[in-house]
Amino acid sequence: MGRTSDAKERIVRSAMELMHAGGYAQAGVQEICLRAGVRKGSFYHFFASKSALALAVIARFRLFSDQFFDRALASDLPPLQRLERLFQMAAALQEETQRENGFVKGCPFGNLASEMSGHDEALRLALAATFTSLQHRLSELLQEAALPHAEEKAEALVSLFEGAILLAKTHNDPHLIRRMAPIVQQWIR
């Protein structure tokens, strides 16, 4: 029996790191393969294209983000306090990436969306589904808080959340996200 290989996993992890730090365009197949310690033939054995790999990267980031949102929105607090915790946790995550890398990485979904949505329909649809999923979660939270127009407010919250992360990345200042937390709670009421 042949040995099992973790080459596919290494490729996905390498692509996640490179795409999150520098974007889709900067994460070349050669660089991904070098970081993963695999040859290009192995890459194309697992992925038909870089776009196919990016879909796998989005799916993997979705697993992490689902866990993140599960913790942030856990029902141990009243709904609006959970919303504030979401922003506080996002700020803490960006502060951690800043300490590790010297810069705020931003949201992997927002980064890919701003770079690739006009160039790759499959990626655009996968990213749109990710944001729609977050919107539904936030809508449920707002419905639990008995707030009117929950769906519309949830859509605005996703925009505000992603915008705060984008500005934090642009200014290399994760505290921008942290400062939004109490403002969001006031606005949503």
Image (tube, rainbow, N blue to C red):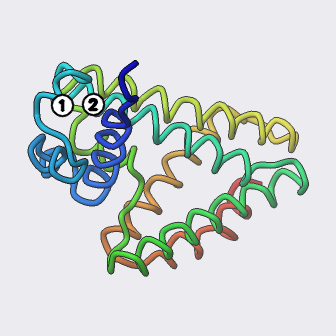
Please indicate whether residue 93 sits to the left or right of residue 137 in the image. Answer: left
Quarter assignment of residue 70:
top right
Seen in the image, is 30 located left or right of residue 137? left
Determine whether the residue tagged by mark 2 lies in a helix, strand or loop. Answer: helix
Residue appearing at x 12%, y 40% in the figure: 29
Q: Are dots 2 and 1 in contact, CB under 8 Å? A: yes
Residue at the spot of label 1: 50
C-alpha separation, residue under disc 2 versus residue under disc 1: 5 Å
Between residue 179 and residue 71, name the one nearer to us. 71
Residue 52 image position (x, y, % from top left): 26, 24
Q: Which residue is drawn at 34% across and 39% down?
A: 12
Decide if residue 114 is on the left or right side of residue 79.
Answer: left
Residue at the extreme front = 1
Label 2 amino acid? Leu
Q: Which residue is painted at 70% across and 70% down in the image?
A: 182
Q: Is the N terminus in the top left, top right, bottom left or bottom right quadrant?
A: top left
Q: Mark 2 sits on what residue?
A: 53
